[in-house]
Image (cartoon, helix red, strand yellow):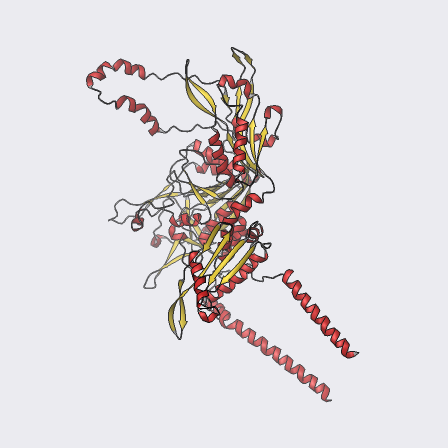
């Protein structure tokens, strides 16, 4: 009987073991004990892979048995792809293709076939260093992957480091997934709102306004055409404010496209005073983009030139809708860059060998932006800020902004958009005579943005921050020169409560001005101010006569003059408009265009002689009389948004942060400054999860406090030898305790 019981127990244990393994394959969990979550997916990655609606295939081509550190890359990649697959809801699969030598188990023909497949996808072997018998040799190795989603193919040709690997994979998935899945996964449809007051019909004959009856069918045709490639996610909604339709907060966004008129006497009767709205817009969730349906033009009538209204062409409406759908649901992320007012160019327009002629070009910044966004230049002197962008970058402007241009920036912010402002306090003017050494002249800059920022509660001081914790220049002879105007912002001066700064340990700041904040005004406006980082307690200011020659700068003798200063702010909330209680400025005329229009007819007439000029003196005098333009009595409401939707402002007192010498990245090493800049833009653009994912892998982990060189040596020795010694000591203690217990048991039974 006992033998059968043992047999039954063995079978029962075997069944339980099998069931545990089966459950473990389906209901498993992993625990990542690393501080930054290195071996678990970020929220952005989980969201990207879990929203797949079509299968995603990942093909990896990686040579086996590579030397360190590349062998760890393959292992890490396998674990990472397993995490993606586990969160993909069975929509993702991956496969590692063997492209190694024949001894790895495949025939030569199969290996060659896999290599050809890799090359068809654009994956080619790269050179890696291998140490064999104390000799350094170069080895050709495949280290790439391909992602296939429907008919879309993305590749990562070389994976030679675990640094930022999750970000690269997730970005590729998002790029393919967004266009297909974002529309399919919308919980509600995108509304195309047609906001037209029926009262406009009363005034239409006076305005000579035609095409009202075809507006709704024409817009419905546009929606139908776009629905064929938007998975049917567009819906036309008609709103008649004259009939009481539409919520007040919804109509408030369209009021600036309104018309109003007094009582008019016409041949057909009296038209009572009234008002109307003629506009359309796209709305999805809390995001909305509005556009007027009427435009004014001059028309020649029997009574002379008259100002008339016309409907916007249906093709323009279709283009507007098609261009703004992606930005509305965040398929394609666009950012705007101010390309006027003396701001530095994003790219050099000269050959690389002549790049020194444009030292201010932001080539590295442009490359950094282009990896994540589509950069749209914004020449503010010519037109308003486009509604299709959510963030406008204003970097180092040198020229004054007109009140009309400030109005465009103000209203852009009122729409719930974001501003990234890199504002210089001084304009550095280099000496013209380069043969004789002269130090630059620093002139204060006042562009007009200052009064806009002051109204919101923040400002840039007219001074430079100098810091004893700064970059040290060392020459070949070992001499050291502190560059006080290049502060090193250490870990303890970075606000790690901000999620996208959590893993940044050190930043470099060049020629930065300290910031000031009117906290009482900010509080009364209902805004939230966050300090991102500051200088050290050993910093001071230089104002007045600026001289940044390193050998002429000395720290102040009185330590009371030294204190920490804020260097970067984020201000967010519902901003009050600067122009709420001011008359609205008009757009400045383009002087060049005006001159060309007035001078060309009278000065460049082919074949004109002096005799002809004498004959034409009187007619010319008549031509100088400008025709009287009869203005329409129907006026546009010039309303503005006086209180904005929730928006954000990032402010730092230095555009040097965007220069190539600050943002250039060395291969295999992260650049904290580059991560800070792109993470900040991600946060402004509503992509905080992406920012957190990008910065969670940081190799640079300095000691929290600035300790002495001796303490650094002690810490280094402890990390190298102390930890292994502790493990050995722990093993000896455990071995000793087990030996003592064994002897105790033996003594007990021997008695």
**Residue 170 image position (x, y, % from top left):** 51, 53
Q: Quadrant of the C terminus?
A: bottom right
**Residue 512 image position (x, y, % from top left):** 42, 48
Which residue occupies 52% across, 29% down?
A: 218
Tell me if residue 270 can be seen: yes
Q: Quadrant of the N terminus?
A: bottom right
Which residue occupies 54% across, 28% down?
A: 217
Q: Is residue 446 above or below residue 473?
A: above
Which residue is outermost to the right?
A: 1
**Residue 365 image position (x, y, % from top left):** 41, 48
Residue 175 vs residue 98, the one in the foreground: 98
In this rendering, would 603 be left or right of 526?
left
Which corner quadrant of the image does residue 631 belong to? top left
Q: Is residue 579 above or below residue 359?
A: above
Which residue is outermost to the bottom?
A: 751
In this rendering, would 325 be left or right of 479?
right
Tell me if residue 556 can be seen: no
């Amino acid at each position: 009987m006992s033998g059968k019981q043992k047999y039954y127990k063995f079978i029962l244990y075997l069944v339980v073991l099998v069931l545990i393994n089966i459950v473990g394959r389906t209901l498993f969990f992993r625990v990542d004990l690393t501080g930054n979550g290195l071996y678990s997916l970020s929220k952005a990655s989980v969201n990207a892979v879990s929203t797949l609606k079509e299968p995603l295939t990942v093909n990896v081509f990686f040579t086996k048995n590579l030397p360190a550190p590349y062998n760890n890359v393959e292992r890490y990649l396998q674990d990472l792809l397993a995490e993606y697959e586990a969160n993909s809801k069975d929509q993702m699969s991956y496969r590692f293709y063997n492209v190694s030598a024949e001894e790895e188990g495949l025939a030569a023909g199969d290996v060659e076939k896999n290599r050809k497949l890799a090359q068809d996808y654009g994956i080619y072997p790269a050179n890696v260093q291998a140490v064999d018998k104390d000799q350094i040799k170069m080895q050709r190795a495949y280290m790439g992957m391909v992602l296939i989603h429907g008919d879309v193919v993305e590749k990562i040709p070389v994976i030679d480091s675990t640094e930022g690997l999750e970000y690269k994979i997730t970005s590729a998935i998002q790029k393919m997934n967004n266009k297909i899945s974002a529309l399919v996964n919308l919980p509600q449809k995108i509304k195309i709102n047609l906001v037209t007051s029926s009262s406009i019909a009363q005034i239409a004959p006076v305005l000579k306004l035609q095409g009202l009856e075809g507006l709704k069918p024409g817009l419905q045709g546009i929606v139908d055409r776009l629905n064929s490639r938007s998975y049917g996610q567009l819906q036309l909604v008609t709103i008649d404010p004259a009939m009481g339709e539409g919520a007040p907060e919804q109509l408030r966004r369209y009021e600036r496209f309104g018309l109003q008129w007094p009582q008019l006497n016409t041949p057909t009767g009296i038209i009572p005073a009234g008002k109307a709205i003629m506009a359309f817009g796209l709305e999805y969730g809390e995001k909305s983009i509005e556009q007027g349906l009427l435009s004014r033009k001059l028309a020649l009538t029997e009574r002379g030139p008259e100002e008339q209204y016309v409907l916007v062409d249906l093709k323009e409406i279709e283009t507007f809708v098609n261009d703004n759908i992606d930005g509305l649901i965040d398929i394609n992320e666009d950012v705007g860059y101010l390309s006027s007012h003396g701001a530095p160019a994003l790219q050099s327009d000269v050959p690389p060998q002549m790049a020194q002629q444009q030292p201010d070009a932001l080539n590295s910044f442009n490359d950094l932006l282009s990896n994540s966004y589509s950069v749209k230049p914004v020449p503010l002197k010519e037109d308003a800020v486009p509604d299709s962008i959510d963030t406008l970058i204003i970097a180092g402007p040198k020229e004054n902004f007109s009140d009309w241009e400030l109005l465009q920036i103000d209203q852009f912010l009122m729409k719930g958009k974001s501003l990234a402002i890199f504002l210089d306090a001084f304009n550095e003017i280099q000496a013209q005579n380069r043969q004789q050494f002269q130090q630059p002249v620093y002139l204060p800059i006042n562009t007009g943005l200052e009064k806009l920022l002051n109204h919101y509660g923040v400002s840039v001081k007219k001074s430079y921050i100098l810091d004893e914790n700064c970059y040290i220049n060392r020459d070949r002879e070992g001499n050291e020169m502190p560059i006080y105007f290049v502060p090193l912002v250490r870990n303890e001066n970075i606000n790690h409560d901000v999620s996208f700064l959590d893993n940044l340990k050190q930043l470099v700041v060049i020629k930065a001005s300290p910031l000031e904040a009117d906290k009482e005004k900010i509080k009364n406006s209902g805004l939230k101010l966050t300090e991102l980082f500051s200088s050290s307690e050993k910093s001071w200011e230089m104002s007045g006569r600026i001289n940044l020659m390193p050998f002429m700068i000395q720290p102040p003798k009185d330590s009371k003059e030294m204190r920490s200063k804020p260097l970067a702010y984020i201000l967010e909330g519902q901003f009050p408009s600067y122009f709420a209680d001011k008359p609205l400025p008009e757009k400045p005329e383009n002087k060049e265009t005006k001159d060309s229009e007035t001078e060309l007819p009278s000065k460049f007439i082919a074949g004109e002689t002096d005799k002809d000029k004498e004959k034409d003196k009187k007619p010319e005098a008549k031509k100088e009389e400008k025709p009287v333009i009869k203005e329409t009595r129907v006026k546009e409401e010039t309303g503005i948004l006086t209180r904005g939707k929730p928006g954000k402002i990032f402010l730092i007192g230095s555009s040097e942060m965007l220069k190539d010498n600050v943002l250039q990245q060395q291969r295999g090493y992260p650049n904290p400054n580059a991560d800070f800049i792109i993470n900040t833009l991600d946060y402004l653009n509503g992509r905080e999860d992406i920012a957190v994912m990008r910065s969670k892998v940081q190799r640079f982990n300095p000691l929290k406090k600035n300790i002495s060189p001796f303490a650094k040596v002690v810490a280094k020795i402890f990390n190298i030898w102390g930890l292994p010694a502790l493990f050995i000591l722990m093993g000896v203690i455990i071995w000793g305790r087990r030996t003592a217990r064994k002897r105790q048991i033996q003594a007990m039974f021997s008695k």
